[in-house]
Image (cartoon, grey):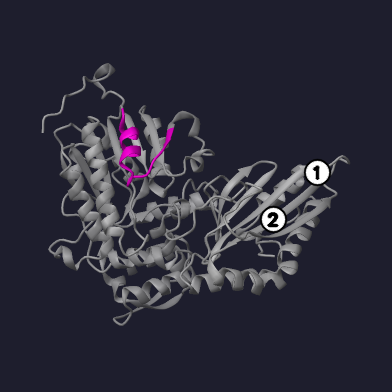
Amino acid sequence: MAVPQRPPGPHGAPEPRRCLVTGATGYIGGRLVPELLAAGHQVRCVARSPEKLRDQPWAGRVETVRGDMTDEESVRAAMEGVDVAYYLVHALGTGSGFEETDRRAARTFGERARAAGVRRIVYLGGLTPEGVPEHELSPHLRSRAEVSRVLLDSGVPTAVLRAGVIIGSGSASFEMLRYLTERLPAMVTPRWVRTRAQPIAVRDVLRLLVGCATLPYEVHRAFDIGGPDVLTYRAMMRRYARVTGLRRRLIVPVPVLTPRLSSLWVGLVTPVPGAIARPLVESLRHEVVCAERDITRYVPDPPGGPLGVDRALELALRRIRDAEVVTRWSSAATPGAPSDPLPTDPDWSGGSLYQDRRERAVDASPGDVWRVVEGIGGENGWYSLPLAWALRGWIDTLAGGVGLRRGRRDAARLRVGDSLDFWRVEEVLPPRLLRLRAEMRLPGLAWLEMVVVPDARGGAVYRQRALFHPRGLAGHLYWWSVAPWHALVFGGMARNIAARAERGGAGTGRGGRG
């Protein structure tokens, strides 16, 4: 595979690369971008919804383009002038055909990269067990393995990093471990808790991904990556309990819980919904331990070596405690969740659009009102009928949705794309507008919009709209069945937001779902 070599940069250092990052709205991609910038590389981000990147602290230092990995033309345009292309997307959870979608997207990515003269593809895949036939792997791992092959066969020098459990603040694996351990001092668990794994800290994953940008062009292969510890999931739970000062957990494995039942169990106990928990659980059925550490020949270990499990857990917990969680597993779009923007045309003709409108004059400054609005959700709750919101969250969880337990990434600030319990921030324009799009299981599309405007008296006017676009007869029946509760839920929300703002935002940022 003959690829023209670039001359080294000043003092023999590798020349900075022009890097394309897919999946920049997701957990790994959103953390990789600032690391690439810090290493001196130029970055172009491709996203289906570029507006989700608008509020990132690094947004002004990157080029952002709109694109979809299944759309050949948008991929072609995104590849122009690129040296290194990071493939950090997957179609997991989008339906039974996700493997075909992944296959098609990877093939398009590889073909367009070769046509554009891209010199390196980097893919973060899954660590697969030694000696297990591919047909026996979970659909998740099988698809990751196939994507690896497609990219390696693309004709572009490719580095595939194969990771197992990734430990970092906000990762799905970490939050699953955290909530299972904290909430269940004694538990009957599936037998996969006895399976050995080799977890890796997210900062080591990012260090290796950045290092792959300057690999010699003749390097074309997959690498296993993991931390220094090999241990069972049960041992990880006990390590977590020790690091956090919890009592030793009583864990009794049983052989009767299937991956589907296990994922439902995880979905009930942790904030990670079943659709995301299931591939994590299925990946733990087989031992996933690194067979080699060849990547260190090209990207040396840092002083002291890669982080062990205890140190990775400590750092993740510190990030959470200090409210410095940069991205979360929920940063990416939730599988199956609606993504349609709010229809803003007054003459919109897309069908029925039900609305519940509330407006209140507030004897407080617009800034005070905005602080209350932006603090909604998470520990602060939804300012009305906590039991009703909790019940709606449980119903959504039982239906396979995300429920209320995703909380917030940041206790005080919101940005476009943030998940917020079972909503997602569609637009935030401080100190005036917050629009949320529902990601709960509904027979239609729903939004909640909150607006703060100054009035002539020096106070503020708070305006609130709940909107619902029904899907079929079930959607219409749903709206009218819950309409009698709107005065209590949405009316109470408007009254309590106004009252809290008039008290100077008392209680914002503290616990309690009321």
Assess disc 2: are there few (<14), some (14-19) or many (≥20) residues with their C-alpha within 10 Å of its C-alpha. some
Residue at image point 29% right, 67% down: 282
Which x, y percent locates residue 321? Answer: 54, 52
Residue at image point 52% right, 38% down: 54
Q: Is 286 colored magenta in this rendering?
A: no
Magenta span: 64-80
Q: Earlier in the sequence, mark 1 or mark 2?
A: 1
Mark nearest the camera among 1 and 2 is: 2
The part of the image, by quadrant, that contains residue 98 is bottom left
* Tag 1–tag 2 contact (CB < 8 Å): no
Q: Is residue 503 visible?
A: no
Q: Which residue is mark 2?
A: 465
Q: Is residue 98 left or right of residue 375?
A: left
Q: Secondary structure at mark 2?
A: strand
Q: Which residue is mark 1?
A: 365
Residue occupying the far right of the picture? 457
- Is 373 in front, or is 271? 373
Q: Quadrant of the C terminus?
A: bottom right
Q: Quadrant of the N terminus?
A: top left
Inter-mark Cα distance, 1 to 2: 21 Å
Q: Is residue 99 visible?
A: yes
At label 2, the amino acid type is: Arg
Which x, y percent locates residue 368? Answer: 76, 46
The part of the image, by quadrant, that contains residue 384 is bottom right
At label 1, the amino acid type is: Ser
Which x, y percent locates residue 319? Answer: 49, 49
